[in-house]
Image (cartoon, rainbow, N blue to C red):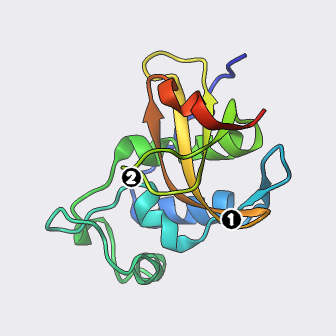
Amino acid sequence: MAERPPLKLMISDLAQLLDWFEKNLCDPCLKDPRGHQVVFDCSRFAYMIKLVSLRGGKVTKPSRVADKIRCGKMSNSDFGGFSAERAQTLSWIPSIILRPTIIARNKSLLVPGDELYAKEFDKEGYRYKVLYCKRMSPNLLVPISSFPREKLGGLRADILWP
């Protein structure tokens, strides 16, 4: 049964958003129902919110960018923006990991990662949010990207859990 999604984050300042990211995704130990841990670090921040350079391209050296945002050397004005939807739904990620609808092998050639977590939410519009992860060891994964989907479709093809 689908659960209601957590409240969306209404944070537009990058320094505040990074602070939330570190406290709520990097610091806690997030384990899926199989006991596998998903570990976030600041190098994923730019990709998880789809932060773009002033020229509209992918941010390079994301760890260094996170450090500069954290210490105030860079701010929103140094970038071309980020996906408000992805940033607002960062708060949904712990429930995707802790209580996924499915965990499956990633068969997509367009999105990198070995496994994905998909969570169905009780809401209007798209119903699923998917977290793509790379497997680092038998019990450790790191996030690659996360975004909404209207339906699971082909994701059900290679289910690892339940």
Mark 2, other Cα within 10 Å: few <14 / some 14–19 / many ≥20: some
Q: Is residue 94 left or right of residue 66?
A: right
Residue at position x 84%, y 47% from top?
34
Q: Are marks 2 and 1 in contact (CB under 8 Å)?
A: no
Q: Which image quadrant for residue 68?
A: bottom left
Mark 1, other Cα within 10 Å: few <14 / some 14–19 / many ≥20: some
Estimate the spatial distance between the alpha carbons at disc 2 and disc 1, rounded to whole Å.
24 Å
Image position of 7 with respect to 72: above or below: above
- Residue type at mark 2: give it: Ser
* Circle 1 residue: 39
Secondary element under disc 1, as helix, strand or loop, is loop
Q: Is residue 141 left or right of residue 111?
A: right
Residue at position x 60%, y 71% from top?
41
**Which quarter of the image is occupied by the N terminus?**
top right
**Pick the front one: 83 or 75:** 83
Image position of 145 with respect to 27: above or below: above
Picture coordinates of residue 44, whole percent (x, y): 50, 66
**Which quarter of the image is occupied by the C terminus?**
top right
Residue at position x 54%, y 50% from top?
132
State which mark lies toward you, 2 or 1: 1
Residue at position x 76%, y 43% from top?
98
Visible in this render: residue 10?
no
Name the N-terminal-most of marks 2 and 1. 2
Q: Is residue 23 left or right of residue 48?
A: right
* Circle 2 residue: 12
